Image: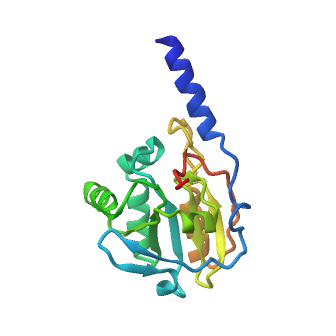
Amino acid sequence: MKHVMRILVMVSAAIVAMPAAAGDGVSVGDSAPAFTLTDSAGNDVSLKDFKGKIVVLEWLNPDCPFVQRHYKAGTMKNLATRYGDDGVVWLTINSTNYMDAEANAKFKVQYDLPYTILVDQSGDVGHLYGAKTTPHMYIIDGAGVLVYIGAIDDDPRGNKDEPVVNYVAVALDEILAGKAVTTAETKPYGCSVKYKK
């Protein structure tokens, strides 16, 4: 049993220590690439639909333990609700090759989510942005420029004693206050995106 636990700890550490992906697709300061995806209700959603708005992109895989932890804690839902009052748009993208609109709809209902989940089974949009982990967070400002890429927070294992810094919340507060994002890039953590091979 100890041997099995040791292996699980090593696998978990390997997942958390994944390299940063910001330079593999897009970088902070780039214009956000346009895309159109279908949501869990079958509607087409385009990034251009939200021109002039602050947009948060979140990469999701409901099977990922890191994602499950955040959704049980309400991390993403609470942020989306809190900043939705300020006009911030929250788009969740599922690039998991084996998950379709039905799987996304089920997850949306399970957690009573106020935002849409977009289907990217081909992985085209995930590769376009360079998304490597679930979760992997991107913030686009009102001018359509990427101003944050990285982790949701500074607590990869969910066991930090001291206060957790939520990088997305800090960045959104700064943007809404008309300030530059002070921490524009961090190392994402989570499960690897299960792209189509």
Q: List x then y, in percent, for residue 69.
A: 42, 43
Q: Nearer the viewer, residue 113 or 197?
A: 197
Tell me: residue 57, above or below residue 49: above
Residue 39, by quadrant, is bottom left
Residue 180, by quadrant, is bottom right
Q: List x then y, in percent, for residue 5.
A: 50, 19
Q: Residue at x 36, y 69 (%)?
A: 115
Marker count (numbered): 0
Q: Is residue 143 left or right of residue 158?
A: right
Q: Residue at x 68, y 55 (%)?
A: 186
Q: Nearer the viewer, residue 177 or 95?
A: 95
Tell me: residue 111, above or below residue 48: above
Q: List x then y, in percent, for residue 41.
A: 29, 72
Q: Is residue 60 left or right of residue 20?
A: left
Q: Residue at x 56, y 76 (%)?
A: 176
Q: List x then y, in percent, for residue 161.
A: 54, 35
Q: Nearer the viewer, residue 52 or 174?
A: 52
Tell me: residue 152, above or below residue 26: above
Q: How is the image coloured?
A: rainbow
